[in-house]
Structure formats: structure tokens, C-alpha cells
Amino acid sequence: MHTRFNHALASLPDSLRLAITPLLCAADFSASFSAEHITMLCATTQMDQQQLAFALLPLAAACAWTPLSTFNVGAIARGASGRFWFGANMEFSGATMQQTVHAEQSAVTHAWMGGETSLLDITVNYTPCGHCRQFMNELNSGAGLGIHLPGRQPSTLGSYLPDAFGPRDLNIISLLMDPNDHRLKAKGDELTQLALRAANRSHAPYTQAWSGVALETRSGRRFCGSYAENAAFNPSLPPLQAALIMLNMAGESPLEIKTAVLVEKSDAVICQYPATNATLDALGCQHLSVIHPNND
């Protein structure tokens, strides 16, 4: 079990702590629980799924990477598959504040990169900020996405973001978490192909600047992330941040990245390279390759 869970685990009710410990200790645990796990945990603890999500928030918050604020936020996204996906905020010393990741963005991206095709609701230990509300408004779940906060009545994204501006205002039909294949092609090694697959999944209907990042850590593990664009532009999540979310959720350190690959079109109207390179440099990785693919 990753040591980051030790303190939070000790604070859980006994029945939940005993039932969940073997799951946390599994070699392939990556901060999510299958529908079968959720059913087992609910039966063992006599909690319903929402009570369980609230109880698990300390574990999600324990995944936060917060060298700047030391303020940990946890989120749990519940997918249409019934799976629970952890999310936590991330900050990077030496990089700009714009490179940070919010917990809700983390949980959503964790689910998306993990293969989830839509979300039912999200549980978070603090009220979603405006940035996160706008980010979630890009989802194919729409305004009906459930929002759950401790001590509050359940609500929806629509109630947190009334009169919202979103993709449909710009006549965009393909929404975040809808399947994509942009049919980009490039030659290269396995890490390059991983970044290429991420680029082909990316959500960039406003600029068509499809991009993806793949990371390899010193332990040899590999992670990828796809660009997630937003109708309001600023809440867009860069592909590096998506890859860092997956790396972090798997229990790896952002300071242990050995090499990285960015795939983006050479003629794209926006360029991910400068911010990607600067953030990786702040994390101690000086090995970034940039691949410009061809359209099929």
C-alpha cells in the first residue's frame, strides 16, 4: 500500500478500513474501485454508494500533490460503469499557477483516460470553484451531472452553473468523454505510439489542435494524457496535466519522470510545447521529444 494512504486509512470506520485495506494493497491499485468492489464495500459497511463516496474522500485527498498550498482537495467521480475514480489537486513548484490541476479536473480526467464514457456524479470535499464548474460543463453528462458535498443536499451542475456558456452555444456536438479518433499517424517507439494514441483521443473541437503526452518514469512505468479543450478556453486541460494525473493516481511521483513525448500537429493554431517543456523542466525532466504527426 502506498504510504500516502496511511493517515487517511486510520481515520476510516473500522468496517470500511478492514474491507478496503486489501484493495489498497493490491499491486495494480491505481486509485479507483470497480463496480464489484463498490458493491462489496457497501454490503460490508452497510453504507449506500453515496455514503461510501463521502467516506472515501479522505483517501482521495491523500493523493493530492500540493507543495505550494499544502491544501488537499479530494474528489470521486462515479462513472456510468459504476466505477469510482479518485481525483486530487496538483501543484508544481517552479511552474506557473496556470499549470495546476484541480481535484474535479483530476477525477474527470482519471475516469476519461481510464476508459469511462460518461459520468453520473462527482463527490468533492469542498465546493467546486468556477473554473471546475466550467470545466465539467464540457462533459457529455451535461447540466444533470450530480454534485455531492458533505453536509449539503445533492444538487446538479446546472444548479451550480446557471445560464451556462458551453459547447452547444458554439454548435459543438462532440463533447468531452465522447469517443474520438482523429486518425493521426506517426512513426516512433512505444512511448511515441502511446502519446499518439492519446492525441487521437483528445477533445479539441474549437481549435482542432489535437495533442497527447506520454511519460516514462525512472521505474519504467508509462502514462499518457490527452488534451481536453473547453468552450471557455481557459479551463482547458493540457495533455501534460492529464498524463500527470494518471501518473499521480498510480502512485508515482511527478519528480521521477525520466523522459516525455509530446505529439501535436506542426500547423496547430495553439502550441503545447512551451508550457509542456517549462513544466517538465520544473519537475526535473529535461528529455522531451516533440512529434508532429500526419493526418490519415
Image (spheres, rainbow, N blue to C red):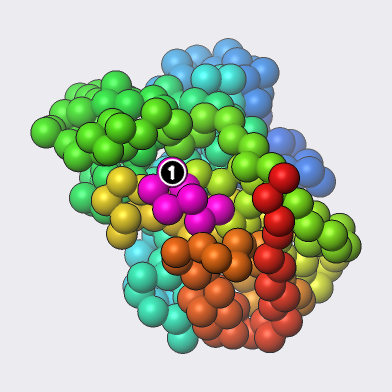
Q: Nearer the viewer, residue 7 or 165?
A: 165
Which quarter of the picture shows residue 245?
A: bottom right
Q: Residue at x 43, y 43 (%)?
A: 205
How many tags in the picture? Answer: 1
- Is residue 159 visible in the rendered structure shown here? yes
Decide if residue 33 is on the left or right side of residue 101: right
- For the point 68% across and 50% down, the residue is 295
Task: Where is residue 228? Give x, y as percent.
Answer: 47, 49
* Location of the C terminus (image quadrant): top right
Please say if 45 is above or below 132: above
Q: Is residue 75 above or below residue 287?
A: above
Label 1 CA crowd tier, 10 Å (few <14, some 14–19, many 20+): some
Tell me: residue 232, above or below residue 123.
below
Give yes or no for residue 284 being in the magenta stretch. no
Q: Position of residue 239 (x, y in %)?
A: 55, 59
Residue 207 among magenta residues: yes
Between 63 and 248, the residue placed more toward the observer is 248
SS class, disc 1: loop
User: Which stretch appears magenta?
Assistant: 204-210
Is residue 45 at all visible to an observer of this figure?
Answer: no
Residue 31 vs residue 135: left or right? Answer: right
| Residue 114 image offset from top left, x and y in percent | 64, 38
Q: Which residue is mark 1?
A: 205
| Predominant secondary structure, magenta span | loop
Q: Nearer the viewer, residue 97 or 41?
A: 97
In the displayed orientation, state which residue is furthest to the left: 163
Q: Is residue 264 left or right of residue 86?
A: right
Who's the residue at 36% across and 34% down the image?
A: 172
Hey, what amino acid is under mark 1? Pro
- At 63% across and 42% down in the image, what residue appears? 182
Residue 207 percent across, percent down from the top left: 42, 53
